[in-house]
Amino acid sequence: MSLRDSLPKINTQLPGPKAAKVLARRAAIMPAAIKSIYPIVIERGEGAMIEDVDGNVFLDWVGGVGVMNIGYSQPELIEAVSEQSKKFFHSMMNITTHKPYIEYAEAFAKIAPVKGGKKQVMLTNSGAEADENAVKIARGATGRPNIIVFTGAFHGRTMLTMSMTSKKAYAAGMGPFPDGIYRAEFPYLYRAPGGLKGDAAIEYYISQLKSVFETHSPAEYVAAIVFEPVQGEGGFIPAPLEWVKAVRKICDDNGILMVTDEVQTGFARSGRMFASEYYKEGGFAPDIMTFAKSVAGGLPLSGVVAAKSIMDKVPGGTIGGTYSGNAVSCAAALKLLEIMRRDDYPGKATKISKVCMKRFGDWKKKYKVVGDVRGIGAMMGIEFVKDANKTPNSEIVGKIVHDAYAKGLILEAAGTYGNVIRFLCPLCVTDEQLSAGLDIFEQVIKSNM
């Protein structure tokens, strides 16, 4: 049986002897501040499975935190990368033009769910770089200085995006931070104050957003409102459609650009190619969208897309970069778009979601530690609590992650309180692998109650 079709199997103590040696070398040469969650040293990966240097096989439900939607070692991507590598690796777009960048940008612009007619695409290298350039584009297009972001947000680790990120554990000791970044309360419906629900909860969160205009920045000085359609590090919290619709109206009424950060939600994860498609279908598409992570099957690439009328207002020389739109990465990205549309990866995400949400819903009924189950498509989160008061239970999450790893399932925590387990499994996971992972997950929940 190929690794691609294998099930989790642990053959040694963890970490195994070979892995332990590599991890010792890591500790000696890499800064400890670059944290590692698991003592795993990967040797190869196929589909949703990885094998470590000691021959242990793991089912990966993290996928590089949303990078491997198409799976490890996709054969057609390998071929596309090989063919481009034979021609040239890279050519800086500020110096010469190469076709892979243009071909990918053209293909992406056709499907990008942002407002406007003719669209333009700027390619960058990482999610943080895309988000930072989205802010620069918004400021350049509006001539305004300020940005509104949200509680629970994660946008990156550059100086600007650290200031946009809510959880300051990601920015400890790094200040002072850039000015002009203001924060509103994100609609975390499970923890809405006073038990607010439905329209009352949405109205509360919209009022909190509007209050920023009074307490921090007048609306006429705000260039953009930036949010994740589903908060990642914040705890896999979906933005309610009615809230997004209201944000769109606030932006339209005040000349503010709405920016969706689809670094983690993009490329079929949500049951659409992009979560912003749901907004476009409802008539409240964003002005600017960022993307990264799964864009090129694991190669570094990211970008920003917006209407040409917005891009035309950006001052010359303020955006761009040496490695932006690397030719090899673009070749992989173009092939990935083709495969995801041909093989209906959004449909795969929807199918996975139905299977998982049924099991997760059953767990919520059976296990009092499961407080909330939520998500869009195959970007799902389970929030663990201690009691009926919804006291966050990060302790059990730590144990679940550890014990699942010992059984060959890779999970990862998230959330402001560290009490959410996220699901970002490659969308090519087989039915048998998905079932095996759910069984392991439930076993470790029960054993830790």
Image (cartoon, rainbow, N blue to C red):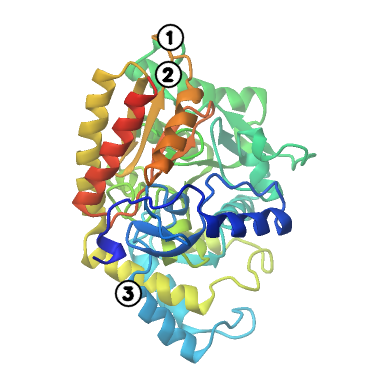
Mark 1 to mark 3: distance in Å?
Answer: 49 Å
Give me the disc on residue 337. none
Q: Which residue is mark 1?
A: 389
Mark 3 to mark 2: distance in Å?
Answer: 42 Å
Q: Which residue is mark 3?
A: 75
Q: Quadrant of residue 22?
A: bottom right
Q: Nearer the viewer, mark 1 or mark 3?
A: 3
Mark 2 to mark 1: distance in Å?
Answer: 8 Å
Q: Quadrant of residue 312?
A: bottom right
Residue at 66 percent of width and 34 percent of height:
168
User: Secondary structure under badge 2?
Assistant: loop
Which image quadrant: the C terminus?
Answer: top left
Along the polypeptide, which appears first: circle 3 or circle 2? 3
Q: In the picture shown, does residue 15 fall above or below 355? A: below
Query: In the picture provided, is 356 more to the left or to the right than 72?
Result: left
Q: Amino acid at mark 1?
A: Asn
Q: Residues within 10 Å of mark 2 (few under 14, many from 20)?
A: many
Of residues 105 and 429, the one drawn nearer to the viewer in this rendering: 429
Q: In the picture shown, does residue 185 fall above or below 15? A: above
Q: Amino acid at mark 3?
A: Pro
User: Secondary structure under badge 3?
Assistant: helix
Residue at 44 percent of width and 17 percent of height:
192
Q: Are marks 1 and 3 in contact (CB under 8 Å)?
A: no
Of residues 10 and 121, the one drawn nearer to the viewer in this rendering: 10
Q: Residues within 10 Å of mark 3 (few under 14, many from 20)?
A: few
Q: Which residue is mark 2?
A: 385
